[in-house]
Image (spheres, rainbow, N blue to C red):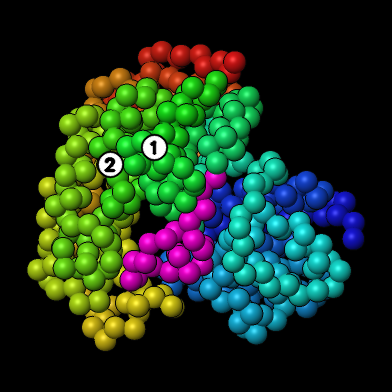
Amino acid sequence: MTTSSRRYHITTFGCQMNKADSERMAGILEDMGFEWSEDPNHADVILYNTCTIRDNAEQKVYSYLGRQAKRKHEQPDLTLIVAGCVAQQEGEALLRRVPELDLVMGPQHANRLKDLLESVFEGNQVVATEEVHIMEDITQPRRDSQVTAWVNVIYGCNERCTYCVVPNVRGVEQSRTPEAIRAEITELGKQGYKEITLLGQNIDAYGRDLPGATPEGRHLHTLTDLLYYVHDVPGIERLRFATSHPRYFTERLIKACAELPKVCEHFHIPFQSGDNELLKAMSRGYTQEKYRRIIDTIRRYMPDASISGDAIVGFPGETEEQFENTLKLVDDIGFDLLNTAAYSPRPGTPAALWDNQLSEEVKSDRLQRLNHLVNVKAAERSQRYFGRIEEILVEDQNTKDQTQVMGRTRGNRLTFFSGDINELKGQIVKVKITEVRPFSLTGEPVEVRQVVTV
């Protein structure tokens, strides 16, 4: 079928991995001749890239689908796609629930979107959830930013945390080769991108599925080695990585981050709970003492480093004392940012079947108390920026104030200041911080450092 003048719309739920997958699928659709539509009601192909980590995100997908399913009865040529983790989890059951769907595809099939859609256009209803080896994708993603970009380095996850559905829906770990990763980053540098975030569901496990070992017995390819390997790519000014697992976070990695000037001093390391018994029940593979040692080591090498993480409250069986251990860890460490959530039972996970579930009232109360402490500690951490001069990589205009631009410090703190986006986008600006808030800053420009891609 012809795709001329046809439009597509993608709605993305969930994590950075999903956002990166959506960019790749958007690139495939544009290679097929589709044009982006901001309004899903004006699109001919609608794709929902879904998340199943929390129940509310999953339910929102069904709400969106219901509206578009009604529309399809009036416009039979409308193509409806559910991709991502809900698709992988539900498979054919999604078609029974929403028979108007044309394509259900798991995360491992993002690179195959063109082939799957061609089958749909031939009149088939397609479910693609079988486990596959992820092939290198030669499609150029449709990047949402012109300054920063995601680069996947490892897909899947081999951990078996008792609350988490990710291994069930994203498959086993599959690392890309260092050469393929560097080639993608090199192309991004040529296109003018300035900051790269290396992505993985469990990024510090990178390389353990690749062949080879060093004389010392280490894996030949690790995240540390990858950072050294891609650090000198021309045009790239900053490197970040996420998401890290405390089980694999080493002093060797921390030392590399301190030595490599392009690697930003920001570490996102989820801890989930500050109580050892709960960590064991979660099958996390570390103790809160080990987590604290990691943070202490980071701050020994990089005293000003920003630390962010994830925490769950209301895990089955969590006592008030165990919850207070989480509060104590948060209070002691002082996170710059903490993503918090009340435990949500997910299909196919062991913890969902346990009989010691907590009430929604208890979970809500604990979440509110944790969030209050998070805001207090983040505000304290922000105070260190007041009066300092920070290097801000300008990403975009401030949508709430057209006279301002926005960007981030090396520590990932969102920062606003006056300026013309047409002149400053992609430049690094020295900014004196004049106002601090728990999660963002405001300042005055002092000097612009022209960044030229070579």
Q: Is residue 47 magenta?
A: no
Residue matched to label 2:
250
* Residue behind mark 1: 214
Viewer-side residue, 20 vs 365: 20
Is residue 162 one of those drawn in magenta?
Answer: yes
The residue depicted at 26 percent of the width and 22 percent of the height is 388
x, y percentage for residue 41?
71, 62
Image quadrant occupied by the C terminus: top right
Q: Where is residue 205 shown, x and y percent of the image?
A: 39, 49
- Within 10 Å of the Cα at label 2, are there few (<14), some (14-19), or many (20+) other Cα atoms? some
Residue 215 falls left or right of residue 152: left
Camera sees residue 42: no
* Depicted 11 relative to depicted 138: above or below: below
Residue 387: mark: none
Magenta span: helix, strand or loop, mainly? loop
Q: Rounded to the nearest whole Å, what is the CA distance between mark 1 and mark 2?
A: 17 Å
Look at the picture and state if 173 lies above or below 391.
below
What residue lies at 31% left-to-right and 48% top-to-bottom? 248
Tell me the quarter of the picture where residue 54 sits: bottom left
**Closest to the observer, 111 or 356:** 111
In x, y percent, where is residue 85?
53, 66
Amino acid type, mark 2: Thr
Res 407 quadrant in image:
top left
Nearest the viewer among 330 and 267 is 267
Could you tell me the amino acid type at mark 1?
Thr
Quick one: which residue is furthest to the front in this view? 215
* Region in magenta: 157-176
Side (left or right) of 369 relative to 4: left
